[in-house]
Amino acid sequence: MTSTPREITRRQMIQRVGLTALVAGPAVGLLSSCATSGGDSAAPSAAPSAAATSATNPFGVKTDAPLEVVIFKGGYSDEYATQSHEPLYKKEFPQAQIKHQGIQTISQTLTPRFASGDVPDVVNNSGTDMLDGGALIGAGQLLDLTPLFEAPSIDDPSKKVKDTIVPGTVESGFGGDPAKPYTLNYVYTAYGLWYDAKMFEKNGWTPPKTFEEFKTFAEAAKGKNIVPFAYAGKNASYYAYWMILISAAKIGGNEVLLNIDNLADNAWNADAVKQAATAWAEIGKYMDKSYEGLIHTEVQTQQNQGKIALYPSGSWLESEQAKDTPAGFEYAMSPTPSVSASDKMPYEAIRAAAAEGYVVPAKGKNPQGGLEYLRVMLSKEAAKAFTEKTKSLTVVVGATEGMTLSPGLTSVVAAQTAAGQNVVTYSLFETWYKELETELRKQTNALMFGRISADEFCANMQKAADKTKADSSINKQSRSV
């Protein structure tokens, strides 16, 4: 699916990224240096000079060129970068000075810099306040990462980087028209319902495999004064909408999610989406209204305290809560329950995909170094260090060989093995269409806390999707796999 115009103006870019105020007042001057293909664009700045390329320096990184790295300081923190990845880059280029910034407000901090043309060389674009990837791609602000994936691997130069990572990783970072990889999704993440294996063992519980079992389990948990299921509505309602979308795909197949990404007509009104929304709304009835006002760490701490049984999240959870997890608490993950016997995917199916995006700004001072930094990340040494520090898998094949995995990560590997080829696909609309994703957070809370029905949820989201599709200023994107 394509839409014209493919490019957007500088003004539209700033609006999409979320800082409309930059368009007016003194900041107008900043926009003149943010080059795009729009009608009011400035001439592109000259590309930074590169050194000669070689087998060990395929991008031609200047040995003394400074490198600026911005990392989202969330569930994975940023120590993996400062203590492992950046030192490995420095080992290659000891004369290079690395400027590191670990932050949580990615969009708020970096949007003015994209507007002024003063951008970092590598950005971990993640978290609640992430940059609008679709807008940046449309504005020509992100580097095509094809040269990275075609470059020789650090571990085995006879292999290309793309041949050393999990299949689907390159495609998961596609954007633009024609589609190209603009994002490296580095973490191989599994999504499901997380629980304390010791608590379940003590109470003789097993994770529910159907939504009927879920409701029976919920009553049993309530009898023990334990909240059966909860999530944080204030800043992490996307944890809940992930579960809804996973269930929709298990009911109707991955085509359901591809149609949503592609803004297909009536994609949100599909029967599979309505069934999934209906099932999860029933579970939402077991939550106290107060959870809508909590942030994710508050809810996760309650689970560590034995107050919550099941929590929706990805496989970063164990690492994120490491400092607050008490002795005797043992993380484990289970798939989302089946809605009916006619579901296209079995109970064992899970969403397991490359996630946690890293981009190289096209207008950076050292884009060659940005590409090389990502190539370093995709070495086994860097990937193993990441897993050791974060208790999360990467997309680098074979990087965990010989490692002793944590209980939570062990359960993830077991779940992936049980799922086999029954893998729920990722969603790209979340990064392609920021305003649509923001509306989904709002509608998810309204559904899960009982203010709207499943039919209203689907109708409201379809209205938002139709609005996005009709807006010619939004760069439309599509996928087929």
Image (spheres, rainbow, N blue to C red):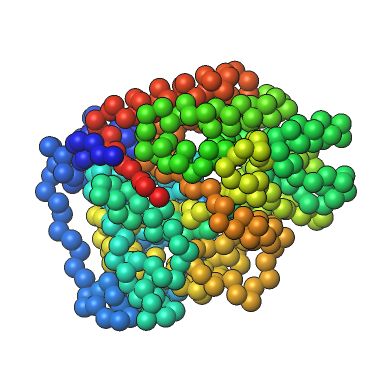
- Examine the rendered structure and indicate whether residue 113 appears above or below residue 146: above
Looking at the picture, tell me which residue is in the foreground, 204 or 85: 204
Q: Residue 181 sits in which quadrant?
A: bottom left
Residue 322: image location, x then y, percent: 68, 55
Count the marks: how many? 0
Residue name at image x 19 percent, y 36 percent: 5
In the image, taking residue 445 as reference, residue 112 lies left or right, namely: left
Between 311 and 307, the residue placed more toward the observer is: 311
Q: Say if 136 sits above or below 356 in the image.
A: above
Residue at image coords 28%, 34% = 474
Outermost residue, front side: 342
- Is 188 displayed left or right of 201 in the figure? left
Give percent across and percent down for residue 156: 42, 80
Side (left or right) of 460 relative to 143? right
Whole-percent x and y of residue 9? 20, 37
Q: Which residue is painted at 18% across and 46% down in the image?
A: 35
Q: Quadrant of the N terminus?
A: top left
Is 326 rendered above or below residue 17? below
For the question of whether residue 102 can be seen, the reply is no
- The answer, for residue 177, to whether it is visible in the render is yes
Q: Is residue 163 above or below residue 20?
A: below
Relative to 467, 318 lies left or right: right
Residue 453: quarter of image: top right
> Where is residue 143, by image quadrant?
bottom left
* Rendered residue at 15%/58% (across/down): 46
Residue 141 in the image: x percent, y percent? 26, 49
